[in-house]
Image (cartoon, grey):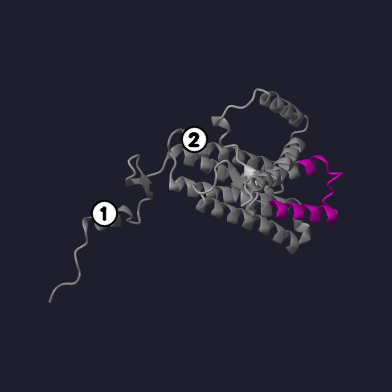
Amino acid sequence: MTNINKPESKSSTVDEHAFDGITFEVEEEEHTQEGQKVKRRGIYLWPNLITTAALLSGFYSIIASMNGDYTQAVYAIFIAALLDGLDGRVARAIGAQSPFGEQFDSLSDLLAFGVAPAILMYSWSLHDLGRLGLAACFVYTACAAFRLARFNVQIGVVDKRYFIGVASPLAAVMIISLVLVARDFPAVFDLREKGIQAINAAVIISVGLLMISNIKYYSFKTVDRKRVPFAVLPIIVFILAAVTYNIPVGILIISIIYALSGFVTTFMAKKNNPI
């Protein structure tokens, strides 16, 4: 009788030994300049190291929020946002972009900009609302997850000049700037009042919905490759000078203006392309 168990091919043997369950390894396909697919092992160090630092910042923010140290929690999220903007630029600068890095960056973003701001808002203001406060914070986290998943599947499809919906780091900045302003003006933002708590719940839900909306926001990804009029520089200087007068208020105002700018951008895009 003919033996139906065929011997394993050399390639399958290699693949089996590549993941022997003992060592940690990553293997992914990349496209060469000639358009061929090649398998490479390992990861690029520097971009993923920066992403790990952003992940650590988000994790620290959660711990700080749980301990009631809200200022440290805010700063940790802000540092994570800075690192998130840095890792992609480093990857592009040194040619170290990879599918692993993209997925790792999204997971880091979910923790730092989806979970950490929600826990901060719940611990700081919404815990007195009970299940309603919990639900409002969960809506924000779920919207951040939806937005990141949608972004991943649309890479290379959408116009790089725009974000579809508010980017998760910018959404997180809106939340943390509100927390900083409220802590600087406790007489105005009296957290013991149910009305203020309800406003905070409405804000975090609204920011979450902006993340999953189809509103177009300018991404600024092409600014560094284009010349702008010289008059732009003095305008930026005046804006920075105004922000330094009260940094939390300045960041919050800029965040609100940016959130509203998406409606203008979307309206103009539909006006120019009515179909």
How crowded pointer 2 is (Cα within 10 Å; few <14, some 14-19, many 20+) is rated as some
x then y, percent, for residue 125? 76, 52
x then y, percent, for residue 130? 75, 62
Q: Is 52 situated above or below 126?
A: above
**Residue positioned 25% across, 55% down in the render:** 11
Which residue carries the number 1 mark? 14
Which residue carries the number 2 mark? 90
Task: Kindly give the residue lying farthest to the left in the view shown.
Answer: 1
Query: In the image shown, does 115 or 263 lie closer to the viewer?
Result: 263
Q: Magenta span has 56?
A: no
Query: Mainly helix, strand or loop, the magenta region?
Result: helix
Disc 1 marks which amino acid? Val
x then y, percent, for residue 158? 54, 48
In the rendered view, does 33 fall on the left or right side of 194?
left
Where is the N terminus found, in terms of image quarters? bottom left
Camera sees residue 224: yes
Query: In the image shown, does 122 or 271 lie closer to the viewer?
Result: 271
In the rendered view, does 146 fall on the left or right side of 9?
right
N-terminal label among 1 and 2 = 1
- Kindly indicate the quadrant of the structure image that contains residue 2: bottom left
Question: Over which residues does the magenta segment extend?
Answer: 181-207
Disc 2 marks which amino acid? Val
As helix, strand or loop, the secondary structure at mark 2 comes to: helix
Q: Magenta span has 193?
A: yes
**Residue positioned 74% across, 26% down in the render:** 238
- The mark found on residue 159 in the picture is none
Q: CA distance from mark 1 to mark 2?
A: 33 Å
As helix, strand or loop, the secondary structure at mark 1 comes to: helix
**Residue positioned 85% across, 48% down in the render:** 190
Query: In the image shown, does 84 or 259 lie closer to the viewer?
Result: 259
